[in-house]
Image (cartoon, helix red, strand yellow):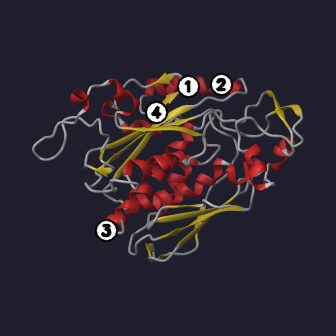
Amino acid sequence: MAGNSFGQLFRLTTFGESHGKALGGIIDGCPAGITLDLEQIQFELNRRKPGQSAIVTQRKEPDTVEIYSGVFEGKTTGTPIGFAIHNTNQKSKDYSHIKDSYRPSHADYVYDKKYGFRDYRGGGRSSARETASRVVAGSIAKQFLSDVKIGAFVSQVGEMKLDKSYQELDFSKIESNAVRCPDTEMAQKMEEYIKSIKKEGDTIGGVITCVIQNVPIGLGEPVFDKLHARLGEAMLSINAVKGFEYGSGFAGVAMKGSEHNDAFNTDGTTKTNRSGGVQGGISNGMDIYFSVAFKPVATVLQSYETINKEGEKVTTQGKGRHDPCVVPRAVPIVEAMAALVLADYSLLARTNKI
């Protein structure tokens, strides 16, 4: 299986399956001398881990990270950073019913067709549990990017959508509720809605908005290595993601150029920021902001019709422990992938490799 690495200079390679012994990764290219706060890494993992509230999967995993190399006396050495997160609460029998059949809209079918064999326990490598490794690497990238501030939050669940710009929101409230929405009233409505969806044995999608501040001017290249293109690639690599837009996004098509253009201030900043902090593929020093759309989880705890390996129609029902809505736990994943992109481009800018 190819495609297990991300990044050029600051490069992460992940390994492991949902119901294997462990997940983990190797980070290549992290500079030496960075003081690592291991408690902060664990804090980020705790934001992503299962079982943290009533509106997420009830799989109970401590998700404790163990770092095996690349760190000495609390600082990075410049050598590969190897780490692992051990699985302790697998219930593989919950997936025996799909050993020979496929969940609609899941990776089950295409895995079988591509590889001729699949680990059906929790989806194996296709499980979103793989993203725990990304969160570890992203936390290290954040600590490398000490001056850059990355914050993500849930801005929509189903049809419930925040009607405020990110400048109007209090980011300190993001971690004050299970949904990770910075608007207290909307967060409560979203939480109740997710609970009602869960009772139905169904799932619902949502949107995460991310804001990156204090990005220096000049990150990114104007042709194939555009900064926003790499951010889009990073976000679309996350399980269940169906859409990415930055700046004015699709709403910009309804505007005239004279309305959409970001007029300059004398210091080079702009009066508006419809460009989303990126112009011509290069960061312009303004806030980078984008939204990521997540589909409803494919595994529904209802009876459904599907096919088996022989192509016969069969009826089965979802079992096991699954998220009724992934966006509350995906917030730190979005932040982590954004941090990995910026760490990579920061190093590329230093070395003028591209």
Q: Earlier in the sequence, mark 2 or mark 4?
A: 4
For marks 1 and 3, give the CA distance.
42 Å
Q: Is residue 25 above or below residue 246?
A: below
Q: Are marks 2 and 1 in contact (CB under 8 Å)?
A: yes
Q: Nearer the viewer, residue 223 or 295?
A: 223
The residue under label 3 is: 350
Select label 2 or label 3 by which is in front.
Answer: 3
Pick the front one: 255 or 345: 255
Q: Residue at x 60, y 40 (%)?
A: 240
Q: CA distance from mark 2 to mark 4?
A: 18 Å
Q: Which residue is mark 2?
A: 197
Q: Type of residue at label 1?
A: Gly
Q: Which residue is mark 1?
A: 158
Secondary element type, mark 4:
loop
Q: Which numbered disc, 3 or 4, marks the residue that appears first in the sequence?
A: 4
Tag 3's secondary structure? helix
Looking at numbered disc 3 in the image, what kind of residue is underneath it? Arg
